[in-house]
Image (cartoon, rainbow, N blue to C red):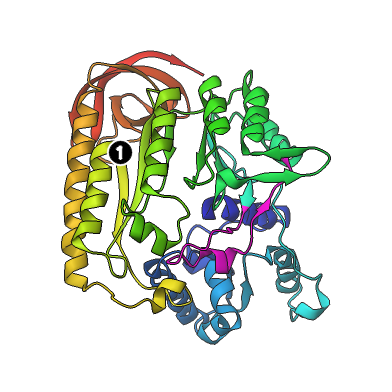
Amino acid sequence: MNIAETSALKLILKERNWEQAGKGENADLVLINTCSVRATAERRFMGRLAEYNAQKKKRPLKIVVAGCVASRLGEKLKTKGADYVIGTDSRSLFPHILKTIEENKTFLEEKAEKPVFSFSPFHYEKGEFRSFIPIMHGCNNFCSYCIVPYLRGREISRDPASIIAEIKLLAEKGVREITLLGQNVNSYYWEGKEKVDFPLLLELIAKEVEKSPIHWIRFLSSHPKDLSLKAIEVMAQYKVFCRHIHLCVQSGSNRILSKMNRKYTREEYLSLVSEIRRAMPEISLSTDILIGFPSETEKDLEETLDLMEEVRFLYAYMYHYNPREGTEAFNMPDRIDDDVKRKRLLRVIEIQAHHTLELLKTRIGSCEKVLVEGISRKNADELITRTERDEVVVVSGNSSMIGKFAEVTISSLKGKTFRAKEFVLCYD
C-alpha cells in the first residue's frame, strides 16, 4: 500500500515539474512516507528523520512526513525536524504544501482546503510492468493487537469506475500484472447507482482485462471473515486471477482468536480453506502467524501448530507479539516472557520451513508460466521469475526478458528457490 501511495505522491511532484534527486544528500525536499503497523518500522523512520534533520543544519532542506506515523504522532513530529506532516486522511494538502515551498512562503493550513481522504486516480510509475491499485482504505475490524484502524480510519471503498479507468491506463502502458490493495480488501463495498461488492468488482475487472496485456491479477490482504464463497467462485471462473491467496490466520486457538477479536473460529477458517481448495485445487496459500499473544498457553500454541499441519501453507510471515500502545491488547494482563515467545516462534518457524520444503519438492519437473521480474543479484546471467502461485524460479537469460511472460520447466530446488535450465516458451 505504501508503494502505491508513494507512487501517487511522486506523480503529483512530477506534475509540478519536480525532479527526483539521485540521492537524499542532494535533495531540496525529502518526502518520507511512513508505516506504523509495527514498532520496528517506526524506529527505522525515526532514524531516517534524524539523519535528514542533521542535514538541515548544513543546507536548506524541507522534510515532509506522510503516512501512518504522521497520523499517529501529528504535530509532535515537527519537534523532531519535520517541516510538514500529512496524515493518511490529509494527502490532499500535498499540492498546497508544494506550492508554498516553490514560492518560498509559509504554509497556512487554515487557508488551505479542508483535508479529506480521497483515492489518487493513478499509481503508475514509468516503466512498470507490475502495478498496485488501492481499491479500499481503512479497517473496521479492530483486532485487539492492531494499530491500523486507529491510523487509517474506517473503511472507505473506491468508485469502481475509477478502478476500471486506472486498469485501462495500465493496460495501455503495457502493465502485465496488477495487485488490488486494501487493509481488508475483500470487505470492499461500493454503494452508488449500482451496489458493487468484492466478488462483483472481481468479475468487472476480469472482463476488462481478458483481452488486455494484463495477464495476472492478485489481491492483498484478505480477512478470513470477509472472503466469501462467491468471491472464490469468481476466482475459479476466471484464469486471470493468480492461484495464490494470502489468508491471515494469526492463531489456531479459538480462545486466542477471540481475545484477538478476529471474528472467526478455527473451524470456520479450516472450512474456508476447504472451499478454496475445492474450487481451485492448484492454489497455494500463505498466512500470518502471531505467537506469544497475552495469556497464550502451550495448549494454544499446539493448536496453532496443528492447524499449520492441516493447512500446510506455502509460506508464512511469523512474528511474536509486541505491545502497541493505543491498542486494546496493550493493557491485557498475562504477557508472555520474551524468552518464551522467542522459543515458541522458533518452533513455528521450524514447522513452516518443513512444510515449505515438502510442498516445493512436489513441484519439481512441472512446466510453469512465469513473469520475469529482474536480474538475479547473485548472477548477472540469471533472471528472477515468479509463478502465479508466488514461487520464485531462477533461470538463465538476459535483461531483454524482464517484464515478459514465459514458460519454464522446474528442474531443481535450492533452498526455497526453484531453478530452471532454460525458457521453454517466451511471449508478451
Q: Is residue 263 magenta?
A: no
What residue is shown with label 1? 313
User: In the rendered image of this protein, does residue 184 appear above or below residue 199?
Assistant: below
List x then y, in percent, for residue 28: 59, 69
The residue at 21%/50% (across/down) is 349
- Name which quarter of the figure residue 190 lies in: top right
**Magenta region, mostly helix, strand or loop?**
loop
Return the residue nearer the eye: 56 or 374.
374
List x then y, in percent, for residue 9: 64, 57
Which residues are the magenta region? 137-160
Residue 67 can be seen in this image: no
- Name which quarter of the figure residue 359 lies in: top left
Query: Is disc 1 surrounded by few (<14), some (14 to 19) or many (20+) residues within 10 Å?
Result: many
Return the residue nearer the eye: 78 or 323.
323
Q: Amino acid at mark 1?
A: Phe
- Name which quarter of the figure residue 409 lies in: top left
Q: Is residue 156 magenta?
A: yes
Left or right relative to 137: residue 49: left
Left or right relative to 101: residue 424: left
List x then y, in percent, for residue 221: 49, 47
User: In the rendered image of this protein, does residue 322 appear above or below residue 155?
Assistant: below
List x then y, in percent, for residue 85: 62, 74
